[in-house]
Image: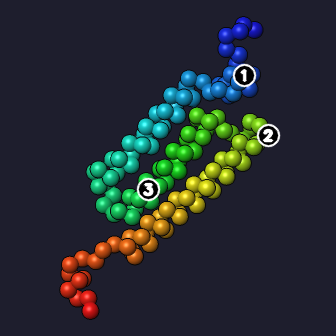
Amino acid sequence: MSGAAHVDDHGHGQDAHGHGSFKDYVTGFVLSVILTAIPFWLVMGDVLGDKLITGVVILGLGAVQIVVHMIYFLHMNTKSEGGWTFMALIFTITLVVITLCGSIWVMHHLNTNMMPISPEEMRHAP
């Protein structure tokens, strides 16, 4: 074999060092751009109309984007390193779910308990 690019015979499109092919990087980049543009479009165009649904959709797209990054840029799959990278994916998804749910919970309670009262509410206060 020549010393240029050694491609493994497993058909994964990766060289001997585990790096992805140019096609994998372009696919990951395009998916990342799309998954970034959709939330901007949803918010700027007020497409869904409901803020809660828009927030949930954006959080979902953010979680999908994390998985895209892990697959296309970090090259995690079920076959490499005896499945340990798949366990890392599950662990990361678990942490993302905990972080997203915790963030929503904290922001909701801050909004409920810390927002200043309106002048109309002040007039009716004792």
Q: Is residue 4 above or below residue 63?
A: above
Q: Position of residue 33 (x, y in %)?
A: 43, 37
Q: Is residue 55 left or right of residue 76?
A: left
Q: Which residue is mark 3?
A: 57
Q: Position of residue 110 (x, y in %)?
A: 42, 70
Looking at the image, tell me whether mark 1 or mark 3 is earlier in sequence order: 1
Residue under the image location 53 percent in, 50 percent down: 63
Question: Relative to the observer, which residue lies in front, 116 or 88?
Answer: 116
Looking at the image, tell me whether mark 3 or mark 2 is earlier in sequence order: 3
Q: Is residue 87 above or below residue 107?
A: above
Kindly tell me whether residue 11 is visible in this rendering: no
Indicate the secondary structure of the residue bearing disc 1: loop
Q: Which mark is residue 121?
A: none
Q: Is residue 111 above or below residue 45?
A: below
Q: Amino acid at mark 1?
A: Ala
**Number of numbered discs present?**
3
Kindly tell me whether residue 63 is visible in this rendering: yes
Q: Which mark is residue 16?
A: 1
Indicate the secondary structure of the residue bearing disc 3: helix
Q: Position of residue 94 (x, y in %)?
A: 63, 56
Q: Amino acid at mark 2?
A: Gly
Q: Which mark is residue 82?
A: 2
